Amino acid sequence: MRTLRHTTRRQSNVLKGSKASVGTKPNREQWLDEAVSELSAIFKERGYEVPPVRVSCGFAHTSSRSVIGQCWSTKSSDAAINEIFISPKLADPVEVLDTLTHELVHAVDNCEHKHGKEFKAIAQRIGLQGKMREASAGPALKQKLTAIALKLGAYPHSPLKVPAPTLSLRARPRAICKQCGFRVPMLKAWVHYGPPVCPMDQVLMEKHGEWD
């Protein structure tokens, strides 16, 4: 997971039949498959074999809106392959390739070590730098990604403008004992029963927050 982070041999890293026909403009997923083939060569130069992966454009399985890429272990896939998702917020081809490279490191590790030392060893050897959770291409790797982006052409995708989550100004209901200060959060489903009795002082606790 990254946060805000064509020979027949190389074709084996993506699903068969996913590439665009000669003379046709690739769709988004075909572009990503071609990108995997190109990036696999960089990994191979450093002694790593990129496993079969399926790459799609989609949001990560997390509430964090800073996550721009996610790789799933083969254990999570019925097809027993690594599934990678690139955020729909990304549209710049070099940034997409950068994020994809980060997720391919996870695929090589099969998501076994998150962003630990094993992940770090692979990432740094490939050319990623910075904090591993947000690791991105260093200068040398960035040049290679730029060249790949020029070869692949524009990323056929229009970015989604994701609105920021609306923060509620309503305070959650809770009850506080005016004598000892003991407090307890209240569930909306039970507020109609009123505040509870303090277990220490045996007095009715006071309402705080939004109870209506």
Image: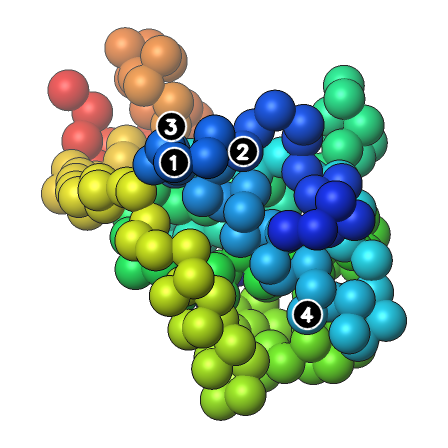
Which of disc 1 and disc 4 is earlier in sequence?
Answer: 1
Which of disc 3 and disc 4 is earlier in sequence?
Answer: 4
> Would you name the residue on which mark 4 appears?
42
Residue 78: in sight, yes or no? yes
The amino acid sitting under disc 3 is Met
The residue at the point 20 percent across, 25 percent down is 211
- Disc 4 versus disc 1: distance between alpha carbons? 26 Å
How many other residues sit within 10 Å of disc 2, few (<14), some (14-19) or many (≥20)?
some
- Disc 2 versus disc 1: distance between alpha carbons? 12 Å
Mark 1 vs mark 3, foreground winner is 1
Q: Tag 1, which secondary structure? A: loop
> Would you name the residue on which mark 1 appears?
23
Quadrant in which residue 132 is drawn = bottom right
Residue 125: image location, x then y, percent: 74, 81
Quadrant in which residue 207 is drawn = top left
Residue 184: in sight, yes or no? no
Which of disc 2 and disc 3 is earlier in sequence?
Answer: 2
> Would you name the residue on which mark 3 appears?
186
How many other residues sit within 10 Å of disc 4, few (<14), some (14-19) or many (≥20)?
some
Which of disc 3 and disc 1 is earlier in sequence?
Answer: 1
